[in-house]
Amino acid sequence: MPNEQQVKAVDGISLEVFEGEIFGIVGPNGAGKTTLVECIEGLRIPDRGKIEVLGMDMIRGGEKTRRRLRRDSGIQLQAGRLPDRIKVLEAVDLFASFYGRPVSPIPLLRSLGLGDKINSYFETLSGGQKQRLFIVLSLINDGRLIFFDELTTGLDPHARRAIWDLVEEIRDKGKTVVLVTHFMEEAERLCDRVAIVDQGNVIALDTPANLIKGLDVGVTVSFSLDDTSILKRMANIDAIKRIEESGGKVVVYCSDKRGVASVINTLTESDIGFSDLSIKDPALEDIFISLTGREMRD
Ligand SMILES: Nc1ncnc2c1ncn2[C@@H]1O[C@H](COP(=O)(O)OP(=O)(O)OP(=O)(O)O)[C@@H](O)[C@H]1O
Ligand SMILES: [Mg+2]
């Protein structure tokens, strides 16, 4: 989507989201995720391409169609804003008034831990409480399609887990959820399928399990050593792909479980002391790093 600076934020993405699934979109900063979901939501109009949502053509259908979609969906924007002096319940009532079928505000506020905050001004909420209020606002409409752009950013681990349960309940009611996230654990645990987006393109799309299986990122063994001379011996073992060491903390990337056995044998057969040994199967995060690299993006 070229804008005034001619940045192609999204370029040639083709994907299908199935009804009733939680569809995840992950990718580095600036990859084009927000631009992509805002096009699907009807908040941005792409220069080219075709977007069909709930059977409606979002581009040729014009503003009338985009308004119809908004009536049947819930949207949590990445950078939501509210006036400082609006009270929590006032904001929820205001958003509820936009829709024909709003859900009951108080139980929804309670389910997001904001039951005690209904008379608080927006400006007095903590960052995580504001984030939860934006989730309430995206769920106040009983829509078929829900979009979350960075669902649990800024939330504590309790709130994050409670919201994961809530999102699963939404999916189990037959609704479709499109979820942009930077938390690979969240995508792995919650999403039925995940698209990895980089530089405006989809570079992988599958179930988390298939993405993990499909890429040969292997198993990692981590441990701490006082004397790192033994690592030279390990580097010659076939099933070991890479060794990283910093300040005595070692991570060995093995291509398979044989490599893990070799690392442990080498450690136990030597006289060198080691500690904090742990073995980790590959996770979505490893796939993400392996596909998108380690460089920080602008
Ligand atoms: N209004 C705009 N004007 C100029 N460039 C923009 C604008 N909106 C987005 N971009 C650019 O488009 C690219 C994609 O941005 P986008 O917000 O879609 O990324 P993102 O994947 O959501 O990133 P993040 O993970 O940081 O939220 C970036 O290079 C960004 O700088
Ligand atoms: Mg974004």
Image: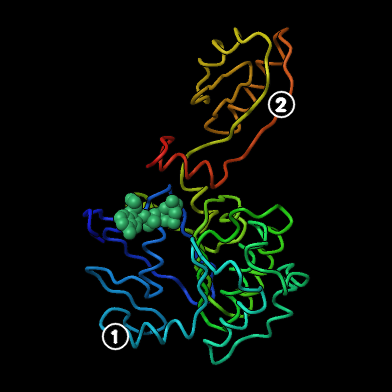
- Residue 212 placement (x, y as % from top left): 52, 48
Q: Which residue is label 2 attached to?
A: 277
Q: Residue furthest right?
A: 116
Callout 2: CB less than 8 Å from ligand 1: no
* Residue type highlighted by circle 1: Gly
Residue visible at 25% across and 55% down in the picture: 8
- Residue 51 placement (x, y as % from top left): 32, 74
Residue visible at 42% across and 48% down in the picture: 29
- Count neighbours of disc 1 (C-alpha within 10 A) and say few if under 14, some if 14 to 19, many if 20 or more: few
Figure disc tally: 2
* Residue type highlighted by circle 2: Leu
Task: Judge from the rendering whether residue 160 lies leftward or rightward of residue 6; answer left or right.
Answer: right
Element under disc 2: strand
Q: Is residue 297 above or below residue 45?
A: above
- Residue 154 placement (x, y as % from top left): 62, 53
Q: Which residue is label 1 attached to?
A: 61
- Count neighbours of disc 2 (C-alpha within 10 A) and say few if under 14, some if 14 to 19, many if 20 or more: few
Q: Quadrant location of the N terminus?
A: bottom left
Task: Judge from the rendering whether residue 244 lies leftward or rightward of residue 272; answer left or right.
Answer: left
Residue visible at 51% across and 64% down in the picture: 179
Whether residue 202 appears in this view of the structure is: no
> Where, by quadrant of the figure, is residue 85 drawn?
bottom right
Q: Quadrant location of the C terminus?
A: top left
